[in-house]
Image (spheres, rainbow, N blue to C red):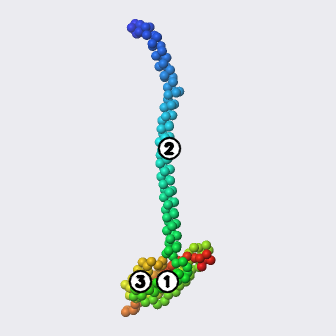
Amino acid sequence: MNPIIERALAEKRTVLIPLAVVLVANVLAYGPVVRPRGVKAEGAADRAFQAAASRRAAEGEEQNARALVTGKSRADEELSAFYQKVLPGSLEAARRLTYTSLPALAEKSRVQWQTRTSEVEPPEKGARLGRLDTRMVLQGDYSNLREFIYRVESAPDFVIIDDVVLTEAKANEPLTLTIRMSTYYRLGTSGV
């Protein structure tokens, strides 16, 4: 070894030995103490990030659930309003609706109605609505028959066109339209 280094080690032994001991202690402490705490800190940061992401996801799900509840209650309100305000309240009201409004629409459209029959479809057990089927046979020219169909579809009364059959007539005779319509009505507590 170099004599200068030997001399420096001998003279500074009191300072170098404690430094060497501290250095060895640091190296020995790094493995069991410092490194696990660093890993633990990294894991905590990862868990915090994952928790924040989970929280954002949960908040999004909560918002969707609230929107679903709001939408469902709004749909229930609209359905209730439809039942109360739009649908006829009874079979008699449904019959009045079809017996008065349909001939009036035919007259406004300049078509002649030939026959009209109605049939009540028996409601299923526990049903809230009944159905009244109406079949009309009308005669007129094509544009007037189209106007009648348009008036039925755009009328405020709840009438659904189920089937339309247009029969071509002989020369100089009006066309014949057979139209099947239905309307629904609220059933009473007795099912009628």
Residue in view at x 48 percent, y 32 percent: 38
Disc nearer the start of the sequence (1/3): 1
Numbered circle sitting on residue 51:
2
Q: Secondary structure at mark 2?
A: helix
Residue 15 in the image, given as x and y percentages of width and height:
45, 12
Task: Indicate the amino acid at tag 1.
Answer: Thr
Task: Tell me where residue 106 sits by quadrant.
Answer: bottom left
Disc nearer the start of the sequence (2/3): 2
Q: Tell me: residue 77, above or below residue 51.
A: below
Residue in view at x 48 percent, y 38 percent: 45
Task: Indicate the amino acid at tag 3.
Answer: Phe
Which quarter shows the C terminus? Answer: bottom right
Please state which of residues 158 and 39 is positioned toward the viewer in this rendering. 158
Residue 12: tell me if it is visible.
yes
Disc nearer the start of the sequence (2/1): 2
Residue at mark 2 to residue at mark 3: CA–CA distance: 64 Å
For disc 1, the marked residue is: 98
Q: Tell me: residue 59, above or below residue 91.
A: above
Please say if the residues under marks 2 and 3 sit with CB atoms less than 8 Å apart. Answer: no
Q: Tell me: residue 101, above or below residue 75.
A: below
Q: Nearer the viewer, mark 1 or mark 3?
A: 1
Residue 175: tell me if it is visible.
no
Q: Secondary structure at mark 3?
A: helix
Residue at mark 1 to residue at mark 3: CA–CA distance: 14 Å
Residue 40 in the image, given as x and y percentages of width and height:
51, 34
Numbered circle sitting on residue 148:
3
